[in-house]
Image: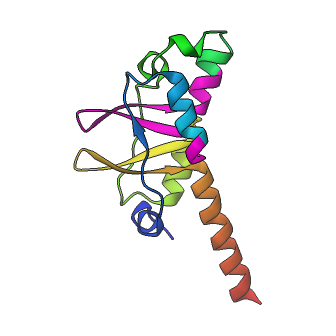
Amino acid sequence: MNTVKEFLASRTKSLVTTTEDTPVTEAVSMMTRDNIHSLMVMKDDQMIGIFTDRDYVHKIVATQRDPAQLRVGDVMTKEVTTVSPDTSIKTCIELMHDGKFRHLPITEAGQVIGMISMTDVMKILIDFHDQDIETYF
């Protein structure tokens, strides 16, 4: 698997989104329920940010803010790096490493079509490594 497009073809989970008006407590419940670490924040079918578990820890817990008093739009990351389906997995790894983030929304023609995470990348690398070992022996 070399590109994001190939990853998307193997993806079975659908993208989970929220809005900027969603209470933080509800967003965290969604992430916990779906066993995910981020939500795309959408407005009128356009991505306006991303809310991650790191946003929760760094912007709420670490600063002792009350999550019950906050909306996703208050703490989401607004400057989001995205990739296209033709982006290589290697480039995704480099972007995540250099930017110190773990989630990359995938966009095509200005629309979010998916997400690739560091966990996804690790699974891809493990699968590649396992295949490589099998062909060696």
Instruction: Give the answer, above or below, for where 109 lies relative to 38.
Output: below
Between 58 and 125, the one lying in front of the other is 58
Q: Which residues are magenta?
A: 33-57
Give the quarter of the figure containing the C terminus. Answer: bottom right
Between 85 and 37, the one lying in front of the other is 37
Image coordinates for residue 84, horizontal then vertical, percent: 35, 53
Image coordinates for residue 69, horizontal then vertical, percent: 52, 10
Tell me: 123 left or right of 99: right
Image coordinates for residue 4, horizontal then vertical, percent: 43, 60
Between 31 and 130, the one lying in front of the other is 31
Residue that appears at 56% across and 39% down: 31
**Residue 49 sits in which quadrant?**
top left
Residue that appears at 69% across and 88% down: 135
Query: Which colour assignment does the render follow?
Result: rainbow
Instruction: Give the answer, above or below, for where 1 lies relative to 119.
Output: below
**Residue 9 sits in which quadrant?**
bottom left
